[in-house]
Image (cartoon, rainbow, N blue to C red):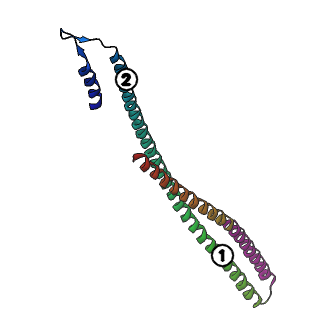
Amino acid sequence: WRALVALFVLPIAALQHDGQGRAAYDPALDKVKSMLHGMIKQRLAKQAASTTHEEFCDEQVQQSQERIKELEHQLEKEKVDLEKQRAQFAEHKMNIGDLHSDIASAYRASSDLVNAHYGKAKESRNEYKFNEKQKELAARTKAKQKELARTDNDLVRRKRYLVQQEGDIRMLEKQLAAARASADSIRS
């Protein structure tokens, strides 16, 4: 602003006065006046552009902060979901162990049944009970094996999902770091 004030003072000092204390008109000053008006307009335009740039930067900083908050929220949500999936994955692994144990127990029970049956005298009633028990154990074993196969497939699917989710989290962390770096560069 000091420069603007100096620009107004200089032409006033350069004015010539007539004998009665009034400024006399000098056509040469028209060029100086137009030049001063042009400089003032240019200075005001720069100031307006500077204000607009500042406002733009403030808007960009605000958008960056909103994006950072959005990414942080999404990242937190993904991490919670990942922990939930990990817990379910561990539970499925334990279920697979239990199924293997159940199948082994069924085989042991079948073996014990066969050993006990062949150590006795054969009666038709005992033979019928033996065959029914064998069928029951075989059906139970087959059902457990099917459940084991389903659980194994589900475990593989869950593992794939876990790996994919971990990759998504890494990508979100990179996006968040880039958003923070962008916000920092806008501020400076």
Instruction: Judge left or right: residue 128 versus residue 172.
Output: right
Q: Give the image location of residue 100, x and y in percent.
A: 66, 76
Q: Quadrant of residue 127?
A: bottom right
Residue sitting at x 29%, y 31%: 3
Q: Residue at the top extreme?
A: 20
Amino acid type at image mark 1: His
Residue sitting at x 39%, y 24%: 38
The answer to whether 125 is drawn above or below residue 75 in the figure is below
Q: Nearer the viewer, residue 123 or 12?
A: 12
State which mark lies toward you, 1 or 2.
2
Q: Nearer the viewer, residue 50 or 163?
A: 50
Amino acid type at image mark 2: Met
Q: Give the image location of residue 73, x and y in percent.
A: 47, 51
Instruction: Judge left or right: residue 152 versus residue 65.
Output: right
Magenta range is 123-151
Mark with earlier residue (1, 2): 2
Crowd band around label 2 with a 10 angstrom C-alpha radius: few (<14), some (14–19), many (20+)? few
Q: Quadrant of residue 124?
A: bottom right
Main SS of the magenta segment?
A: helix
Q: Residue at the left extreme?
A: 20
According to the picture, the residue beneath numbered tag 1 turns out to be 100
Residue sitting at x 72%, y 84%: 111
Q: Secondary structure at mark 2?
A: helix
According to the picture, the residue beneath numbered tag 2 turns out to be 35
Q: Give the image location of residue 23, x and y in percent.
A: 24, 12
Q: Give the image location of residue 69, x and y in percent.
A: 44, 48
Q: Nearer the viewer, residue 36 or 32?
A: 32
The answer to whether 155 is drawn above or below residue 112 in the figure is above
Q: Secondary structure at mark 1?
A: helix
